Amino acid sequence: MSTAAPLGLFPGKPTPRLYDRIVEVLYGRVDLPHALARKYPNATREWCWQFVFPQKRWVNPRTGEQGRHHVHESLVQKAIKAAVRRAGLTKRVTSHTFRHSFATHLLADGYEIRTVQELLGHKDVRTTMIYR
């Protein structure tokens, strides 16, 4: 499981002015694999590569360039565990629980099963049918 969801997966895009501010203030660059970074040198600043949950700023020791990295999944798991404990819930809750809840609510709100299938990344609609 990866908590590193590029913002390009979500609808919309900030205004150019807002995005420039994000890049300037929040070091809106990401570290890409070397081959990809060489092939697309400006990709590190593109909106579609930005992380929804950035963890911290990093500094490239060779260039001095700064950027952001994704939150490690263990931090998300710990935060969920703490929230469940504070809420006094007795059932087991994980990040995957949110995935199930998301699918169930979409179907309850009238979304087509094929739409939910696509959003969840299921190859076979039978996998998505468990939410009906």
Image (spheres, rainbow, N blue to C red):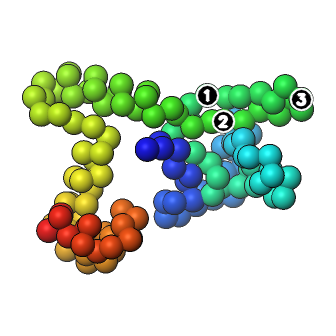
Q: Quadrant of the C terminus?
A: bottom left
Residue 102 occupies quadrant: bottom left
Label 3 vs label 1, nearer the camera: 3
Mark 1 neighbour class, 10 Å CA radius: few under 14, some 14 to 19, many 20 or more: few
Q: Is residue 87 left or right of residue 66?
A: left
Q: Residue 48 in the image: x percent, y percent? A: 63, 57
* 73 vs 116: above or below: above
One can see residue 23 in this view: no
Mark 3 neighbour class, 10 Å CA radius: few under 14, some 14 to 19, many 20 or more: few
Residue 129 occupies quadrant: bottom left
- The numbered dot on residue 68 is 2
Q: Earlier in the sequence, mark 3 or mark 2?
A: 3
| Residue at image coords 24%, 53% | 100
Question: Which type of secondary structure does the marked residue at label 3 adopt?
Answer: loop
Q: Earlier in the sequence, mark 3 or mark 1?
A: 1
| Residue at image coords 47%, 42% | 3
What kind of residue is marked 3? Answer: Arg
Question: Which type of secondary structure does the marked residue at label 1 adopt?
Answer: strand
Residue, disc 3:
62
Q: Quote the CA–CA distance across marks 3 and 2.
A: 16 Å
Q: In the image as oriented, which residue stretches furthest toward the left? A: 90
Q: Earlier in the sequence, mark 2 or mark 1?
A: 1
Residue, disc 1:
56
Q: Residue 70 in the image: x percent, y percent? A: 57, 37
Contact (CB < 8 A) between labels 2 and 1?
yes
Question: Which type of secondary structure does the marked residue at label 2 adopt?
Answer: strand
One can see residue 20 in this view: yes
* 126 vs 21: above or below: below
